[in-house]
Image: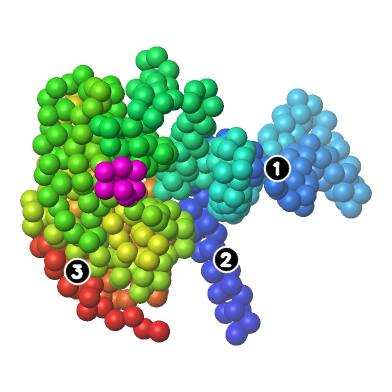
């Protein structure tokens, strides 16, 4: 009896695991279809026993019926009465019977092949993610010595991942590698006088200035985005390193947009907080628009988080308190971020937070050129009201910070998929509590994050200050 219970329990557990694995595989199929490289990786890395098994299964319909007929004939030869009965059974019926048998076996075998493939999908996707991470690591190591090779490795890595966060990070690295190669190409083509302007190419929306406003000497291109480019520069008047953000040339044709950019820059320059990137100056020079700002040595929070690997609770709390304090200060100054995400948070070398790009989402919305076919904001971190096209407020930043804390403490986003799918989930679907994905998360932190991710703005914490206060009271068990 006890043995029977064990066998029944084992069968039940196996069935449950198979169902869960099948569901996981079905959820991954749409992403795999859009990533042929992952499918190719799965096939090329299959184990020989699996390939042999699939070959045997596919051969079953053509071999088994004949084998069964021969075995039955040897074990139980046809009797005289059966032979007589066979005289009255048309040969065509026998052929139809064989065809039907083979069709049933082939269909069953095909379904089994598909089912085995489904069970192999999650493991294959996981292996392709590991391969993607390896390529990214190799690319990081050679990006200075061999930019071309690093770009190739980054592109291979992005083709082997379905994680939207990693895709975003890899895309930024690809863009940075492209920019660096273009910058090196321009430098090799022409060495300019100290106060000259180098134009990349006719019709390009970017230009690299050697000296801006007879004061800021550019030394390096740091990155490029929809709003423009960011450069490392030296302030020759105050003798300090700064960052220069250049407004993209195609946006300068709209006078109302430039005026809005100027107004927002002046408002943001008034923000003075230890955890906010300081704006120094607004510059219009030689037909270009620039903002000079604090240069932060460190890395983006997005790069600090390794996909699938949560940060320890103490680090989550430390960074969370700094981020919420910065946002509380900005909200007190009537400044709403509207696009809070890990890519807009810098982590300094001494583990301090610097939030940047306040108000740029709202500035971008003032441009008719950027509104056409563009979703303002980042789908993985957008609040339900933003996803529904409504006005974003301070509570929207609270939701976005909640998504960021969720990612930091679990290594995963609460919602995944393509952009439209994520927006729909933000509006209507409740996320899995982070505590279920990481048992080490303090209960109080789990509860706080879930309250920040409430669909209704009224149900979320009242302010960023309240969030900072709660985070400060959470104790970590060692």
Counting residues from the start of the chain, the first of labels 3 and 1 encountered is: 1
Is residue 29 in sight in this rendering?
A: no
Total marks placed? 3
256 left or right, relative to 355: left
Indicate yes or no whether the magenta region holds residue 389: no
Q: Nearer the viewer, residue 116 or 188?
A: 188
Secondary structure beneath dot 1 equals helix
Instruction: Check contact, mark 2 vs mark 3: CB within 8 A.
Output: no
Q: Nearer the viewer, residue 175 or 236?
A: 236
How far is the residue under mark 3 from the one under mark 1? 50 Å
Q: Nearer the observer, disc 2 or disc 1? A: 1
Q: Nearer the observer, disc 3 or disc 1? A: 3
Secondary structure beneath dot 3 equals helix
Report the magenta residues as a range. 234-243
262 left or right, relative to 243: left
380 left or right, relative to 282: right
Magenta segment's dominant SS is strand
Secondary structure beneath dot 2 equals helix
How far is the residue under mark 2 from the one under mark 3? 45 Å
Instruction: Check contact, mark 3 vs mark 1: CB within 8 A.
Output: no
Identify the residue under disc 3: 468
Kindly identify the residue that appears in the image at 82 percent across and 46 percent down.
Answer: 68
Q: Nearer the viewer, residue 336 or 233?
A: 233
Counting residues from the start of the chain, the first of labels 2 and 1 encountered is: 2
Identify the residue under disc 1: 44
Is residue 442 in sight in this rendering?
A: yes
Identify the residue under disc 2: 14
Location of residue 146 by image quarter = top right
Q: Position of residue 346 (x, y in %)?
A: 34, 55
Kindly identify the residue that appears in the image at 61 percent across and 43 percent down.
Answer: 145
Q: Position of residue 45 (x, y in %)?
A: 70, 47
Instruction: Check contact, mark 2 vs mark 1: CB within 8 A.
Output: no
């Amino acid at each position: 009896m006890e043995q029977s219970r064990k066998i029944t329990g084992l069968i039940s557990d196996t069935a449950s695991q198979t169902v869960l694995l099948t569901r996981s595989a079905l959820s991954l199929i749409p992403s795999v279809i859009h990533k042929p490289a992952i499918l190719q990786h799965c096939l090329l890395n299959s184990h020989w026993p699996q390939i042999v098994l699939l070959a045997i299964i596919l051969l079953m319909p053509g071999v088994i019926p004949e084998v069964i007929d021969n075995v039955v004939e040897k074990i139980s030869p046809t009797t005289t009465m059966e032979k007589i009965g066979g005289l009255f059974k048309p040969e065509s019926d026998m052929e139809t019977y064989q065809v039907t048998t083979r069709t049933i076996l082939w269909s069953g075998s095909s379904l089994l092949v598909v089912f085995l493939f489904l069970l192999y999908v999650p493991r294959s996707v996981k292996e392709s993610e590991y391969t993607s991470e390896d390529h990214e690591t190799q690319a990081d190591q050679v990006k200075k010595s061999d930019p071309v090779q690093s770009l190739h490795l980054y592109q291979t890595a992005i083709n082997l991942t379905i994680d939207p966060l990693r895709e975003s990070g890899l895309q930024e690295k690809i863009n940075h590698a492209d920019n660096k190669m273009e910058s090196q190409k321009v430098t090799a083509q022409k060495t300019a006088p100290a106060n000259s302007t180098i134009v990349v190419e006719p019709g390009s929306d970017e230009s690299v200035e050697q000296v801006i406003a007879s004061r800021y000497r550019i030394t390096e291109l740091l990155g490029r985005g929809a709003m423009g480019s960011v450069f490392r520069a030296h302030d020759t008047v105050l003798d300090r390193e700064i960052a220069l953000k250049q407004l993209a040339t195609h946006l300068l044709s709209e006078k109302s947009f430039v005026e809005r950019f100027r107004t927002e820059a002046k408002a943001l320059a008034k923000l003075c907080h230890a955890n906010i990137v300081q704006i120094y100056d607004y510059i219009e020079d030689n037909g270009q628009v620039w903002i000079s700002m604090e240069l932060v040595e460190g890395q983006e929070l997005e790069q600090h988080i390794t996909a699938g690997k949560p940060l320890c609770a103490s680090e989550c709390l430390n960074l969370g308190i700094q981020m919420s304090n910065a946002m509380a200060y900005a909200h007190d100054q009537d400044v709403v971020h509207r696009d809070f995400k890990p890519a807009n948070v810098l982590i300094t070398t001494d583990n301090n937070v610097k939030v940047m790009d306040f108000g740029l989402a709202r500035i971008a919305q003032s441009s008719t050129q950027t509104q056409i076919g563009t979703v303002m904001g980042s789908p993985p971190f957008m609040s339900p009201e933003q996803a529904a096209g409504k006005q974003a407020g301070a509570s929207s930043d609270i939701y976005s910070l909640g998504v960021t804390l969720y990612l930091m403490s679990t290594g995963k986003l609460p919602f995944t998929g393509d952009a439209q799918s994520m927006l729909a989930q933000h509006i209507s679907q409740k996320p899995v509590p982070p505590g279920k994905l990481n048992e080490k998360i303090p209960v109080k932190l789990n509860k706080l994050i879930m309250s920040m991710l409430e669909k209704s703005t009224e149900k979320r914490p009242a302010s960023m200050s309240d969030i900072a206060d709660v985070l400060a009271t959470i104790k970590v068990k060692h």
